[in-house]
Amino acid sequence: APVVFRNSEQEITDIEIENTANLIHVDAIIKMKTTEEGGRKTGFISGYRPNHVFEYKNDYPVNTFIGDIQFDDQEMILPGEIKQVTVRFLFHMPIEKYLEKGRKWWILEGGSCFAEAEMIDFKLPEENEI
């Protein structure tokens, strides 16, 4: 099966993603750059999984996270658009420190920033019952 998310600790496939309780759901506003500003030439559909960077140090990302962008009220988000979406991240400690309302971050493809996002709200996975 194709890999959706990967980090050094775990992988989640398309089938498993619907059944996992280990996803952080982040509500955010995404502002797509225009093509002229260096953004994408085309839009993307719901389920797109670009890289998300919350912090840079010496012009390099401190951590890069893959996040699954979800929306359902239109077919695509196009260059230059502003859209409210849900981004799903794997729950692991390095991302937890960046979770705060109002937090801004960058969305990259192949090392190029094509959008910025601002966190409206987030929901951590429910803790497993013992």
Image (cartoon, rainbow, N blue to C red):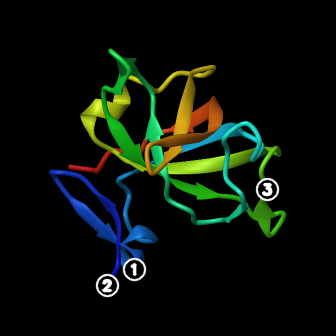
User: Residue at left 45%, top 27%?
Assistant: 54
Which quadrant of the figure has residue 76? bottom right
* Mark seen at residue 15: 1
Query: If the image is split into quadrants, where does the N terminus sit?
Result: bottom left
Name the residue beneath numbered marker 2.
Answer: 1
**Dot placed on the residue nearer the N-terminal end, 3 or 2:** 2
Q: Which residue is mark 3?
A: 78
Q: Amino acid at mark 1?
A: Ile
**SS for tag 1?**
helix
Q: Nearer the viewer, residue 106 or 60?
A: 60
**Residue in the picture at 27% in, 50% down:** 129
How many residues crowd around disc 2 within 10 Å: few (fewer than 14), some, or many (20 or more)?
A: few
Q: Which mark is residue 125?
A: none
| Percent coordinates x, y for residue 34 in the rendering | 77, 43
Q: At label 3, which amino acid type do we have?
A: Leu
| Disc 1 + disc 2, Cβ < 8 Å | yes
Whole-number angstrom distance, CA of label 3 to CA of label 1: 28 Å
Q: CA distance from mark 1 to mark 2?
A: 8 Å
Whole-percent x, y for residue 35 in the image = 75, 47
Callout 3 secondary element: loop
Amino acid type at image mark 2 = Ala
User: Where is residue 10 drawn, in percent x and y?
Assistant: 20, 58
Counting residues from the start of the chain, the first of labels 1 and 2 encountered is 2
